[in-house]
Image (cartoon, rainbow, N blue to C red):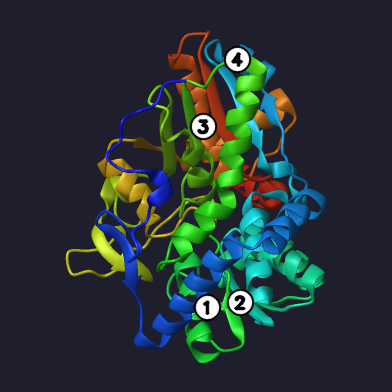
Amino acid sequence: MSTTNMPFDPENMPSESGHFGNYGGMYVPETLMTPLFELNEAYREAQKDEDYTNTLKHYLKEFAGRPTNLYFAERLTDKCQGAKIYFKREDLLHTGAHKINNAIGQALLAKRMGKKRIIAETGAGQHGIATASICAKLGLKCVIYMGEEDMRRQSLNVFRMRLCGAEVRSVSAGQRTLKEAVNEAMRDWVTNVRSTHYIIGSALGSHPFPMIVRDFHRIIGEEARRQIIEKEGSLPDEVCACVGGGSNAIGLFFAFLKDSSVKLTGVEAGGRAIKSGEHAARFAGGRLGILQGAKTWILQSDEGQIDATHSVSAGLDYAAVGPEHAFYRDLERIDFDRSSDHEALNAFQTLCKTEGIVPALETAHGIAYAIKRAQELPKKSLLICNLSGRGDKDVQEVANILGNK
């Protein structure tokens, strides 16, 4: 298998200060510095503890349902008349998305640290239900922050969280979506840091969260790399995934970073148009800045005010991208594209009709790119797309949108 001579070892990233090159870091209030240092130390110790790692493996298998399938989409491939399309079926996991990998890992870490209360933010609701689910299993108190607009779009997941015993707190500030939910969760953590652990749901925020979230999702790419070699006898030509904060994407990409023959593509939310307030494609309209603990690419004004964002999917309309993604983009190791609302909705319907799989609207952005890309590649090419979540939560919203049209 070919490898690339990169000027860094991905296994040694980030630096001790939490930086991926010029990105990342710890830009937080002083009151959070000590708990972040404690979290980093506790995580490092847990990695070396066989009891912890064995327990994590047990829950990933018995509770979450790993490993997930690498699925050949035969009818979709025939329709595209190009590359063979494979999906990494994270939608088959318990609670319906990749988010459960990280939720289990962090919940077990919190319990190891003696924390009895868990808080989390959620946009599309998949991280919320994953966190609520594992908290119910482990007997931990759970509070989920969610923007009012996201609660409207994802009412099914709100009810699922409450069924699992979580308290769901609505956030009415700003756009009433994910960014505001993160703000409220951070305020809660500052106030209750001694008893509470904050399970961030994506590869963003202050160090050590981007590293921790990436590590808990690395299993996606490790499985996919092994599975494609078993099925096809070679590595894929390209691997793609949707990117909001970037957890499902970095989880899939990480195992392929050293393989120079494998193109890696992240797909952002193109929204209605690449105009201010109409999209969430950070690399198409953003600039370097600091948001919620990390330096990264952000959609913001010349004065540093965070721009309004839009996406048909509740989980991709975050104003910043995970710092590790920004780092790899600078190194030209990960490319970034975007899919519009229209393209995502078409991909959502296409996958339903060709494969009988209902994807999450977030995931549909990656699928839209995969459909387009497969038609450009030769038939002998192999393309893996991360099917990061299922679309039960989005069916009513899609019905409303299509009905209105």
Mark 4 is surrounded, within 10 Å at the Cα level, by few (under 14), some (14 to 19) or many (20 or more) other residues, namely few
Q: Give left or right: position of 207 versus 200.
A: left
Q: Position of residue 356 (x, y in %)?
A: 75, 30
Task: Name the residue rendered at 52%, 78% in the picture.
Answer: 185
Near-viewer residue (196 or 302): 196
Lower sequence index among marks 3 and 4: 4
**Residue contact at pointers 2 and 1, CB within 8 angstroms:** yes
Residue picked out by circle 2: 119
Residue picked out by circle 4: 233
Image height of 259 relative to 41, above or below: above
Q: Position of residue 346 (x, y in %)?
A: 56, 33
Closer to the observer: label 4 or label 2?
4
Task: Name the residue rendered at 69%, 27% in the picture.
Answer: 71
Label 3 and label 1: CA atoms lie apart by 32 Å
Residue picked out by circle 3: 368
Q: Amino acid at mark 1?
A: Ala
Lower sequence index among marks 2 and 3: 2
Q: Amino acid at mark 3?
A: Ala
Lower sequence index among marks 4 and 2: 2
Q: Amino acid at mark 2?
A: Ile
Label 3 and label 4: CA atoms lie apart by 26 Å
Q: Which mark is residue 185?
A: 1
Residue 266 shows up from this direction: yes
